[in-house]
Amino acid sequence: MKICFIMYPWERVNPAQDSTLRIIHESVKKGHEVSITHPSNLTIRDSVTLSFCKKIVANGKPSANMISFYKNVTFDSQIEALGEFDVIFMRDNPPMDGLLLNFLDSIKDDVFIINAIDGLREANNKIYTAAYYDPNRELIPVTHVSKNVDYLLRMIKESENDKMIMKPLDGYGGSGVIVIEKSAMHNIRSLLDFYINREKGQSNYVILQEYVEGAEDGDVRILMLNGEPIGALRRRPVAGDVRSNISAGGSVEKYKLTKQDKILCKKIGEKLVRDGIYYAGLDLIGGKLIEVNVMSPGTITDINRLNNTKLQEKIIKYLEHVVEQRNELKKDFRPEDLIGHAEA
Ligand SMILES: Nc1ncnc2c1ncn2[C@@H]1O[C@H](COP(=O)(O)OP(=O)(O)O)[C@@H](O)[C@H]1O
Ligand SMILES: [Mg+2]
């Protein structure tokens, strides 16, 4: 198959740790045609969406060592029509570039995009999780999303708990996640004001969320492929920090899914697939869903190391299967089947 990775710059890949590199390596190993590109390379010419790509030159079996694979890989520069790939794998870092999605809208029916453009658009910030239907409050913590300072202050005062979490709606990597405590109410209006009005000429939503007990022991990252968990790990925060993100200094440990985690994965997994989110990273604390990461979730390398797995093999097998099925459908398609269905 022909696969294109729309990703952060190749020069920024850390070969010892990078998840995307492992997926690329597996694609090359399986003999697929692999190109990489960066969102800034997208172009439209005569109504065709193109990208300046770097195509990996097939050169026998790739080195099994990621660092030497990374160092020795060679590329051919090519302009490629994105609609002609079988798969586009979105591996750009957050924040999401809305215009990138507009470029891809034009080819979204021709190529299998992981994740689907409409899914990315819908789930690219924390509203997706906050709005998840959970009438019995089993799956997600109590969450408010608002930019109304008085409302948020009232929610803090009315909360049964002494502490809550406040974070920006579109943050990532743990940035801006803080604990607020009722005992320090005199700071909170100023903090809310700062979070909401931190940018000139534009106000921002904030998330106010129940502090989930157990966060001191870290959070759990679960990688979901086609609605099912394929791997997980626990991230432990550094002492004195509430955030478990690895980019905030957290460390990783082996983790086995509990029965409750599996039930949550099944429920969320079905929705993810319906929404076109075929590959995602869930963040759980105390068995509750905190966040769905749909933009380039990492941790493959750590999960592999802790469990002696190769998750990239599962991912590529899944893509091969999807492409095979799509091609079958295309083969069976006969234009005459449309007769009588065309709109007048
Ligand atoms: N409601 C919460 N209760 C306790 N800890 C939380 C809560 N929300 C976030 N955290 C901590 O902050 C980290 C980052 O929060 P998250 O919502 O995943 O945002 P980000 O997109 O920045 O990763 C979590 O991994 C967790 O350690
Ligand atoms: Mg997170």
Image: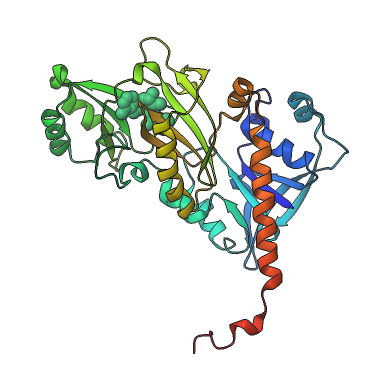
From the viewer's perspective, tell me whether residue 19 is left or right of residue 268.
right
**How far across and how far down the image is residue 42, in percent?**
62, 52
- Asked if residue 341 is positioned above or below residue 114 in the image, the reply reads below
Q: How many marks?
A: 0
From the viewer's perspective, tell me whether residue 18 is left or right of residue 164.
right
Q: How is this picture coloured? A: rainbow
- Asked if residue 280 is positioned above or below residue 175 in the image, the reply reads below
The residue furthest top is: 239
Nearest the viewer among 274 and 195 is: 274
**How far across and how far down the image is residue 235, in percent?**
47, 21
From the viewer's perspective, tell me whether residue 259 is left or right of residue 127.
right
From the viewer's perspective, tell me whether residue 308 is left or right of residue 242.
right
Q: Quadrant of residue 8?
A: top right
Report the residue at 16% width, 17% height from top.
Answer: 184
Report the residue at 23% width, 41% height from top.
Answer: 147
- Asked if residue 23 is positioned above or below residue 17 in the image, the reply reads below
- Asked if residue 165 is positioned above or below residue 27 in the image, the reply reads above
Q: Is residue 98 visible?
A: no
Report the residue at 33% width, 46% height from top.
Answer: 132
Q: Is residue 76 visible?
A: yes
**How far across and how far down the image is residue 91, in percent?**
59, 41
Ligand 1 quarter of the rendering: top left
Nearest the viewer among 95 and 63 is: 63
Report the residue at 73% width, 36% height from top.
Answer: 25
